[in-house]
Every structure is written in structure tokens, then in C-alpha cells.
Image: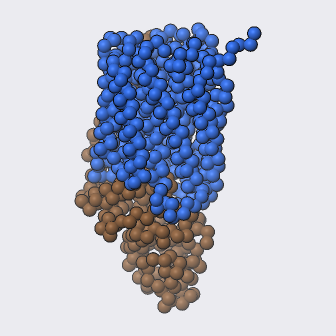
């Protein structure tokens, strides 16, 4: 840690980790609902829908807090100056967490906007906007005052401004259901296949510069290419959500073609990471940070690139749309890309924030935790994939009624539940490890 | 590759895609009204959408394939199940889904809210979205039924269905009403024996069912109707009794 104000990031990371754990507990409850018959009395009080709203909103909240914390860590280093208003960063954290908690408690009492992933009621939406404005002002003014612009910063700030702007499209009430979903995807798709990718690419580039000592110019050059490909495929690729919502037929072509290209930028990011790793001028240390970073590059490609491509063509999507296939892709992609980029950054930044020499720490226990969490998510995604293929075949192709076709799927949801327990175990260990980092043991003589 | 050509890749890629996307968005807006039959999108339908959102229905059910995957897709719920079945499930889910391994919460909806939800689902069911979802495709149902009715001599069950005016409430092929479930959909879920028993006393098998009893029919006649309905959905799955 070179700048005092970077310290605010630590509080963001701690809150993000705790919310992540809570998200997983709710995820287990959702999987449980799929294979076990929850009695009517419980369903009346705490339905699946409420738990799902909590599970998904916790995901968005912890990941955004992680991104914001990472930005507060990276921007002082990139600008070589202190944050403009470190105390406002704490106020912003309190505001966003209070809004999040109010939303979660509200869901329990049926206070909701009732649109998946955007359930936060409108009054709370405005508080989110206030929090986002505080954040952008803080970061923006820091950069402007320092008058030092880098591609990493540009990508980070560009992604975050884009992210905040898109949120606005999710706020109004739409009379027409088709128009509603059309703009719902401006938030969801353009977040995860646009804005969030910019943030991720920037954070990865930042970590690679710091960890490998490879020249900034080289890394930033490839960052431009990655971003160009992400946005070229990702923006028009939104069309793969417009196949079946009463939009004109040309979206089948546009969505199909552009989204078929979406794996390429992710693949480029994987190749870049590997190449920079080979050309490093410093040793691969700490090992565990690299395990997370490289694990992210690989699972990002598999989850977002491969699993996404598998059902993106309209000919396939006609049968898999809105099935457990989507769930499978969603889980592996979110974990591979955004959970792991956050965790990588935490492993990179938290030892430095704790002033451990060279950012090194005792890795004991962290490796097992990584493999438990990652193999757990791979396992549950495969279980969802089997469930999804069964559903597509039995319900969509054979024409069985929903509830009949769900019967054989229950077994696979129980398998997903078991893998979910492994994930929770791994993540609890990661959280514990991160919150109690110790200096490495002295090397044996 | 030099840094300046990398920047060109970034700007050209981004702006091309953005320009295409915004142009198509503009064009799509001009076509939504026709594709969604916006002339039928009145205040009652909008009120129904508000109820749908207030009760967070969409975090269990999908609609247009979006939302939770925990409960059936609602895009064609109206054409599949008909008005009475929807009302029954909304009013008394604990009764309508008593035998199901998956429950729906009792939402304590007012009669007016239920009316509006029915209006909403009726409007949604007519949306033209490239005939998705496949399992509820009216095109598929109509053509298979047309083939069946044209291919064979009129079966005794089919004759009874028309004599007893079943289509005054149910849909079949190109004809019928949407008060009760589509006969083809019943055929995917139930076997002939179950249907015969149900005809005699609907309330005994599905408490609260809106259908009147047809106990004036002989057991043989009821069985014939059951066999006819099941034959509409050959090759599809069955609910295990």
C-alpha cells in the first residue's frame, strides 16, 4: 500500500466477502426447494421467489462492492495520488450497504419491484443512484486532479460509468411486457457482457502490470484489443436475448452471429494472461494469487465463452431458452469471471493493505479452499447442465408438461445441492483465510 | 500490432456495434405495437402487469422465458390452461396443487386482482414471438390435431366430445374456447382412466374444479372420451398416477 487512502478498499472487501457467504446460503436453500417438497405453510411465508430475489441481489451487491473497493485501491496507484475524498468513500459504503439490507428485509415482507434481478423498489433505486454518483465523483475527481490518464483507468472508469448509466434503464415502469424485457437486458446483458467485462479486463491488466513487471505499454495495447472485441461482440450480441420476446426476426441473425463471436475476446484474455505470465520479470509469487488469477482466466472462458456459446444460436436456444441450461451457464460464468476476478483482486490487495512485506502471505489452507470452491461450482454447473438438457428434451421437444418433465430433474438438483455444500465450505475457508492473513513462515534454511 | 492500431480496433469495433444496435433498436420500436397487439393492451392489462410484479410472480415463473425457472412458463398459460384453471390456481393454490410436489404460495389476491391477472395473461398469450415456447406451440397442436381428425374415421370419443359441446369451454385444434384447459394439454398429463373418473366427478380428483360432472355418461362413454383425449398427445409424457 503506497497511498493512505487506498485503505478504504479493505472495508469494501470485508463487506463483499460476508455478503458472498450469505448469497451461497440462500443458493443452497433454492437448490433444496427443487428436490424437496417444501410444505405449503413454509411456502406461504418464505416462497422460492423471495429467496431467489435475495440470492441474486446479494450477488450483484457483493460484486459491485468488490469492484468499487478494487477501484479505490487501483486508482491511487494509477494516478499516483491520494483519493479525492476518502471519507466520502466510507459514507458511500454505509449508504449502499444500508440500502442493500433494507432491500433484503423488504423482500421478506413483499416489498419489491417484482422484476427478476431488479427487484429493488424504486425509492431504494434512487439511493443506489446517489451511491453510484458519490463513487463516480470520487474516482473522477481523483483522476482529473492528478492529470495522469492510463488505459487501465480509462477502461475501469468507462466501464463503471457505462454500468451506472445502464442501471437507469431498469428503473421505470413499462406498460408493454416486451418493451420491459427489451430494456431489462440493457441492464443485465450490457452489464455482464459489456460494462463488467471492461472492469474485469482493467483489473486483470492492473494486477498483471504489478505482479509480472511486464511493460505497461505491452499490456495496455492488448487491453485495447480485448475491449474492442468485447464491445464489438457484446453490444450487438444483446440480440441473443431478443429471439423470443416479440422483436423482429432479424434479431435471430444479429444475435446469433455476434454472440457466436463473443468467446473470442475471452479467449484472447486467457491467452494474454498466459503470455504475460511467461514473459514475467518477477517470480510467480504469491503462488495462490496466481492460482486465483489463472483460474479466473480459464473458468471465465469455459463458463462465459464455451457454456454461453453452447446455447446462443437460435436453433439451439429455441429449445433451451428459459431452462436449467441458462442456470448452468449463469453459475459457471458468474463464478469464473466475476467471483474469481474479485477474489483474485482481494488476494492481491488485502496482503498489501495489511502491509505484509511484498504482498506475501501464508498460503496454507488457501489452495484447498480454492479447489473446493471451484470444483464445487464446476460440479453444480454440470448438474444443472444435465438437468437443463433433460428439460429441453422432455419439455420442449417431447412436449411433456412442465411439472412432469421436472420430475427426473429433481435428482440432478439434489446433486447440485451437494456440490453447493462443497462450494460453501470452500468459500467459508477463503473468507476466513483472507480475513486472517499472516506473514509467510520463514523459508527453511 | 502497434498501440495506435490497437486503439483503432477498439474504437471501430465499439462504434460499429453500437451504431448497428441503436439503429435496430429504433426499428424494433416501430414494430413492437404490431407484434404485441398493443391495441389490446388496455389499462386492465397494465393493472394486471402491476399485480404480477407486486407479487413477484416472475421470480418463480418465467414469462417469455425470462425469470425464475422454478415454475411453468406463463407466456401461453392462458391458451394452455384456460381462464378457470388460472383462477383456481390463483385463488386456492393450496387446493389446486395439493397433490403436486411443488407448491405455490397463497397470495391472498382480491377478486379484482385475479381478474386483472387473467386480462394480463390473455394479452400476453397472443404475443407473436417466433412461436416460443415449443411445448405450448398452438401451431404444433393445431396441425397434429388436424392430422388426427382427418386421418381416422371419427372415433366414438371424438363424437362424444362434439355431442356434449366440450368445446364450449375447452380448446381443441383450431376450435373451442379458453375457459378450461386445451384438450391436447390434458392429454399430455393424464391417462384415459383418470379422465374417465374425472368426468364422473371432477371435484373428487381436483377439489374446487370449475368443471360440471358428466355422470350421466356411461363408464364406457367416459372411457372413450379419455382415450380420444390421450390420443391427441401421443408420444408425450404422462404424469405418474
Q: Residue at x 33, y 59 (%)?
A: B51
Q: Quadrant of the C terminus of chain A?
A: top right
Q: How is the image coloured?
A: by chain
Number of marks in the image? 0
Q: Residue at x 57, y 16 (%)?
A: A356
Q: Which chain is brown?
A: B
Q: Choose top left, top right, bottom left or bottom right for residue B117.
A: bottom left
Q: Nearer the viewer, residue A411 or B165?
A: A411
Residue A261 in view, yes or no: no
A48 versus A256 height, above or below: below
Q: Residue at x 31, y 56 (%)?
A: B50
Position of residue A187 measured from the top left corner of the image (x, y, whole percent)? 37, 39
Position of residue B189 measured from the top left corner of the image (x, y, whole percent)? 54, 69
Left or right, A142 with reference to B184:
left
Q: Residue at x 43, y 83 (%)?
A: B212
Residue A442 in view, yes or no: yes
Q: Colour of chain A?
A: blue
Q: Nearer the viewer, residue A123 or A85?
A: A85
Position of residue A414 measured from the top left corner of the image (x, y, whole percent)? 63, 52
A254 versus A268 height, above or below: below
Position of residue B181 measured from the top left corner of the image (x, y, whole percent)? 44, 71
Left or right, A419 with reference to A9:
right
Left or right, A272 with reference to A8:
right
Amino acid at each position: 500500500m503506497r497511498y493512505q487512502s487506498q485503505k478504504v478498499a479493505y472495508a469494501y472487501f470485508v463487506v463483499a466477502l460476508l455478503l458472498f457467504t450469505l448469497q451461497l446460503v440462500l443458493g443452497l436453500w433454492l437448490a433444496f426447494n427443487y428436490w424437496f417438497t417444501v410444505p405449503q405453510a413454509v411456502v406461504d411465508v418464505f416462497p422460492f421467489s423471495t429467496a431467489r430475489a435475495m440470492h441474486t441481489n446479494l450477488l450483484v451487491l457483493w460484486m459491485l462492492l468488490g469492484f468499487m473497493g478494487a477501484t479505490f485501491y487501483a486508482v491511487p496507484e494509477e494516478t499516483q495520488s491520494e483519493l479525492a475524498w476518502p471519507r466520502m468513500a466510507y459514507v458511500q459504503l454505509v449508504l449502499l450497504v444500508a440500502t442493500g439490507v433494507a432491500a433484503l428485509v423488504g423482500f421478506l415482507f413483499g416489498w419489491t419491484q417484482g422484476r427478476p434481478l431488479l427487484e429493488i423498489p424504486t425509492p431504494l433505486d434512487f439511493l443506489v443512484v446517489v451511491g453510484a454518483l458519490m463513487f463516480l465523483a470520487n474516482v473522477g475527481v481523483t483522476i482529473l486532479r492528478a492529470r495522469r490518464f492510463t488505459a487501465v483507468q480509462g477502461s475501469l472508469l468507462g466501464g463503471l460509468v457505462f454500468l451506472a448509466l445502464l442501471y437507469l434503464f431498469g428503473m421505470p415502469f413499462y406498460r408493454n411486457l416486451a418493451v420491459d424485457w427489451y430494456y431489462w437486458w440493457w441492464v443485465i446483458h450490457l452489464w455482464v457482457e459489456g460494462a463488467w467485462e471492461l472492469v474485469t479486463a482493467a483489473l486483470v491488466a492492473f494486477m498483471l502490470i504489478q505482479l509480472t513487471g511486464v511493460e505497461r505499454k505491452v499490456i495496455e495495447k492488448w487491453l485495447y484489443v480485448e475491449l474492442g472485441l468485447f464491445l464489438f461482440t457484446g453490444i450487438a450480441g444483446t440480440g441473443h436475448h431478443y429471439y423470443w420476446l416479440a422483436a423482429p426476426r432479424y434479431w435471430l441473425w444479429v444475435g446469433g452471429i455476434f454472440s457466436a463471436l463473443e468467446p473470442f475476446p475471452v479467449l484472447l484474455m486467457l491467452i494474454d494472461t498466459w503470455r504475460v505470465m511467461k514473459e514475467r520479470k518477477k517470480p510467480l509469487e504469491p503462488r495462490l494469487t496466481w492460482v486465483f488469477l489463472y483460474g479466473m482466466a480459464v473458468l471465465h472462458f469455459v463458463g462465459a465463452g464455451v457454456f454461453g456459446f453452447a446455447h446462443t444460436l437460435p436453433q439451439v436456444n429455441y429449445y433451451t431458452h428459459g431452462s436449467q441450461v441458462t442456470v448452468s451457464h449463469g453459475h459457471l460464468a458468474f463464478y469464473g469471471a466475476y467471483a474469481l476476478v474479485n477474489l483474485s483482486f482481494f488476494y492481491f490487495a488485502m496482503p498489501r493493505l495489511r502491509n505484509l512485506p511484498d504482498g506475501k502471505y501464508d498460503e496454507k489452507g488457501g489452495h484447498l479452499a480454492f479447489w473446493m470452491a471451484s470444483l464445487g461450482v464446476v460440479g453444480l454447473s454440470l448438474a444443472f447442465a444435465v438437468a437443463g438438457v433433460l428439460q429441453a428434451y422432455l419439455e420442449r421437444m417431447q412436449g411433456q408438461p412442465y411439472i412432469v418433465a421436472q420430475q427426473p430433474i429433481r435428482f440432478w438438483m439434489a446433486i447440485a445441492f451437494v456440490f453447493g455444500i462443497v462450494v460453501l465450505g470452500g468459500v467459508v475457508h477463503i473468507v476466513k483465510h483472507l480475513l486472517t492473513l499472516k506473514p509467510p513462515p520463514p523459508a527453511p534454511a | 500490432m502497434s498501440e495506435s492500431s490497437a486503439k483503432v480496433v477498439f474504437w471501430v469495433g465499439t462504434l460499429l456495434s453500437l451504431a448497428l444496435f441503436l439503429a435496430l433498436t429504433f426499428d424494433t420500436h416501430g414494430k413492437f405495437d404490431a407484434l404485441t397487439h398493443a391495441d389490446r393492451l388496455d389499462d386492465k392489462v397494465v393493472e394486471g402487469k402491476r399485480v404480477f410484479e407486486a407479487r413477484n410472480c416472475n421470480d418463480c415463473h418465467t414469462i417469455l422465458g425470462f425469470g425464475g425457472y422454478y415454475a411453468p412458463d406463463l407466456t401461453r398459460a392462458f391458451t394452455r390452461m384456460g381462464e378457470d384453471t388460472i383462477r383456481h390456481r390463483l385463488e386456492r393454490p393450496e387446493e389446486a396443487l395439493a397433490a403436486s410436489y411443488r407448491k405455490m404460495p397463497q397470495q391472498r389476491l382480491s377478486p379484482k386482482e385475479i381478474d386483472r391477472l387473467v386480462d394480463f395473461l390473455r394479452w400476453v398469450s397472443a404475443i407473436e414471438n417466433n412461436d416460443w415456447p415449443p411445448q405450448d406451440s398452438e401451431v404444433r397442436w393445431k396441425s397434429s390435431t388436424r392430422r388426427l381428425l382427418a386421418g381416422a374415421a371419427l372415433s366414438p370419443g371424438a363424437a362424444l366430445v362434439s355431442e356434449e359441446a366440450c368445446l364450449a369451454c375447452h380448446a381443441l385444434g383450431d376450435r373451442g374456447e379458453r375457459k378450461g384447459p386445451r384438450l391436447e394439454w390434458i392429454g399430455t398429463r393424464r391417462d384415459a382412466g383418470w379422465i374417465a373418473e374425472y368426468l364422473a366427478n371432477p371435484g373428487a380428483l381436483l377439489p374446487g374444479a370449475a368443471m360440471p360432472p358428466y355422470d350421466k355418461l356411461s363408464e364406457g362413454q367416459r372411457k372413450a372420451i379419455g382415450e380420444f383425449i390421450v390420443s391427441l398427445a401421443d408420444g408425450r409424457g404422462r404424469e405418474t398416477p
